[in-house]
Every structure is written in structure tokens, then in C-alpha cells.
Image: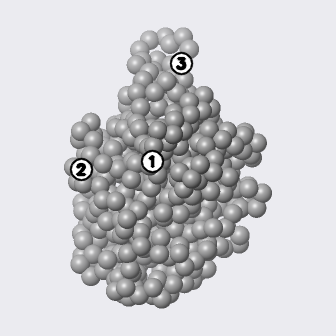
Amino acid sequence: MHQLTLAEIARGLADKKFSSEELTKALLARITQLDPQLNSFISLTEDLALQQAKAADARRANGENGALLGAPIAHKDLFCTQGIRTSCGSKMLDNFKAPYDATVVAKLAAAGAVTLGKTNMDEFAMGSANESSYYGAVKNPWNLEHVPGGSSGGSAAAVAARLLPAATATDTGGSIRQPAAFTNLTGLKPTYGRVSRWGMIAYASSLDQGGPLARTAEDCAILLQGMAGFDPQDSTSIDEPVPDYSASLNGSLNGLRIGVPKEYFSAGLDSRIADLVMASVEELKKLGAVVKEISLPNMQHAIPAYYVIAPAEASSNLSRFDGVRFGYRCENPKNLIDLYKRSRGEGFGPEVQRRIMVGAYALSAGYYDAYYLKAQKIRRLVKNDFMAAFTEVDIILGPTTPNPAWKLGAKNSDPVSAYLEDVYTITANLAGLPGLSMPAGFVDGLPVGVQLLAPYFQEGRLLNVAHQYQQNTDWHTRTPTGF
Ligand code: GLN
């Protein structure tokens, strides 16, 4: 049963081959048995899951149908879940039980999805390896000595290991697409504003976006359908109708114009990944696509700009964790300043503290113009590059990451070397564009992802291209040994 996709689960439930309760029990048992190897869950919510599964079975017995009705999923542990620990991977929130559900959580619950638990993540979503979590590193099911990517590494490892069919995740600079690439999954970062951020604990508010992680594009379409839509509680949510993503999966790719940016093929890219990227282009050409070389001239400035803007916003967002209102509080504070200092010093891990310091520095009166303002100008140039490219092509294709998953601990002493691995993903966040990563082959037994980018609100186009590719390739069906 654990090999079933969301689409297959929906059919099985509709045909009464099994109940949601049976499926939920089987997956909870599988998680208990296998997750100790991976550490992909921070909390399991067995009672809630069984209650939701029974309710979904009852709704189906009453004639209701729906792609997510009775489907088991999990939430990255930065989506607030009422009455359930929402830790954000941090000691700071280890004892925080959210008083309300995030909009995404509430929408998926209303659609009948069953929450199996909360998945591990980099602390406050800062990282690319899932090694900064207070709850310990997550392992990559393809090779337990390697990282699963981050920050949504728990969601990715769990889905890749067939502990469940799909999970929610968030992407500020690549945290859906990069772990998807590292674990042989399909992951979609929607257009900024497509999915509500209400109840999603903020890292960098102008970049954060929730989205689906699953094995297939078809399943990403199903999960995104349940997540997307206008939310008056999020002032950056956009009031645009949500198209039927599943309905457009089978559109023809005949005449689709694919742009391949020449800047992507620089010295930092593993040549074996470059070959797999070009092989995916050939596959799409067979389906009728035409290919064109394009240029994104400001791409080289994107990493420095991102690593100013994201920490700047983080330093502001994380100022609320002061040991007073909620979160961790140090023992026996001597006075108010001591309370702030020690609560934050003890509650936040080293990567989060590093980002708060960088961000506060970039925003300080003397340096604002030199760093923050400059980074915002680069952000506009990056966006302009994309706008120019999308007058010539329908999608942009390239590698998701320059290298496959690295070994656990390999980049711990050099944070900048990890930041550089985000080179292909962060531009979409700076510009607010949708992006998808799909499985496209293996290097040394480790999965490789290809990234597709599209104009604003063209998530349907990304899913269509990825689905057609997956109808003609079998990379996405490969299962890690032992799972
Ligand atoms: N690796 C990037 C960072 O650490 C992206 C993380 C994310 O998308 N949440 O900022």
C-alpha cells in the first residue's frame, strides 16, 4: 500500500479497495518501523490521523468524493497545527503548541486529508541540508550517509522512503525544489502569493511560499489544488482564480518553447548533471518542444543579494522570540536584558544566530544603503532578466542544483559553501516566480533534479510539462533500496 501515489489512493478509496483508516494504520506502522533510520518526523499525530481517517471514510460512505478525501499527508513543522507542537525545528519553539491551524492546514483538513505528523526541517527553514534542526539531522533514504537537502528535508525523506505519498513544504530560496532534487521527488514552489502564508512561521516574508512535495507531477497538482487560493488573512495572498491543475496535465507540448540559460552551465556545475539536463531537453524535444539558448545576465549577483535580503527579513521576523510572550525562556533571568540575551542565545542554534547578526547588520543605519538597498536593486534586475526571457520562451529549464546530495557534515565548517549550492533556485524566489523540480537521473547512485521555471501563475504549465515528461520516463518511479 505504501507504494501508492495520491492519485492511486484516491482511486482505491473510491473503488472501496481499502479504507482511509486501513491505509493510515499501515503507514503509521511503517513510519514507526522505518523512520528511526531517517529522523524525518518531529511529531507523529496518530490520534488526530485516525480520527480524520474515520471521518473521511464516513464522508465517502455518504457519497462524497474528492482527490484528497482520506489521503494521508504530513506537514512541515512550520505550519501551525492547533493543539499540536509546531517547533520550526528549533529549541525556541520546542514547547509551542499552536493555538490555531495555518490556512494551508485548515484547507487540506477540510478537503479530507489525514495528517500523520509534522516533519523535520532546518531550524526556522534556514539551510540546505536539514542539519541545523534542533531535533537532529535527517538522512537521505538513497544513501543514509548523505543529506536529504533542506530546509524541507523531513518532508522529502519521508515521501522518498514511501512513508507517505506526499507532504507540504516551504521554499524561501529552494527548500522545496532542492530536497526534491536530492531525493528523487517532484516539488513545486508556487508563484509568490498563490498559497497563503497565514500560520506559516515566517523566515523571510517576501520570499517564503508553501507548496507540495510528492513523487509525481500528477500528485503535486492534487496537493497544490488543496493548498492554493486567496486568503484575506494574508495581505500578500493574491485574489486570482485557482485553475484545475489536474485538468491541464495532458496538454500537448507541441511547439512549447524551452529556454536554456547559458549562465547555468558554468564551472560550478557537475558535468554529469549538465549531461542529464541536456538529456531531459532531448526527451522534451521528442514531445514537440523547441529549444532556445537564452541569457539571465544578472544571475551571478543573486546569491549575494539573497543572503542579504533573507537574513535581513529573518532578523526582523525572529525578533518576536524574546523569551517573554512564547517560546523558550532561560532559567532564573537576572533582569530583562539578561532574559532576552540568554533566552535567544540558548533558544536559537548557531545558523539562526549567524543569520540574525548578518541581517541586523545589513539593516543598520550606516549600512542599509550599501547592503539592503543594493540587494533590493539586484532583486529587480533579476526579475527584469526573467521578464525579458519570458517574451521569448514559455519555460526555462536547467539543473535544480549544481551537485548531488553531499555527505552529512561535509559543509558544516563552511556555511558559504552550502549557500553557493542554492545558485539555481533562489532567483525564482527573488522574482516571485513558480518553479518545479523533477527527477531526471542519477549520479553515483544519488538522484538529480531538473528545474522548470514559468511566468507568474503558470503552475499549470509546469505541472503539464513535468507530467508529460514523467509519462515518457521512469526516473520518478525509482525507489531507494531498503524502502
Ligand atoms: N538554503 C536557503 C537558505 O538557507 C533556502 C532555504 C529555504 O528555502 N527555506 O536560506
Residue at image mark 3: 330
Q: Name the secondary structure under disc 2.
A: loop
Say which amino acid is labelled 2.
Ile
- Residue at position x 52%, y 27% in the image: 84
- Residue at position x 56%, y 69% in the image: 439
**On screen, residue 178 above or below 273:** above
Residue 238's mark?
2
On the picture, is 307 further left or further right than 122? left
Taking depth in this image into account, of 88 and 422 the one nearest to the observer is 88
Q: Name the secondary structure under disc 3.
A: loop
Q: What sort of colour scheme is used for the picture?
A: one colour
Calculate the distance from the C-alpha at mark 3 to the C-alpha at mark 1.
50 Å
Is the CB of the residue bearing disc 1 within 8 angstroms of ligand 1? no
Calculate the distance from the C-alpha at mark 3 to the C-alpha at mark 2.
40 Å
Work out whether mark 3 precedes mark 1 in sequence or the reverse, and give the earlier one: 1
Looking at the picture, how far across and down is residue 64, in whole percent? 44, 43
Say which amino acid is labelled 1.
Asn
- The mark closer to the camera, 3 or 2, is 2
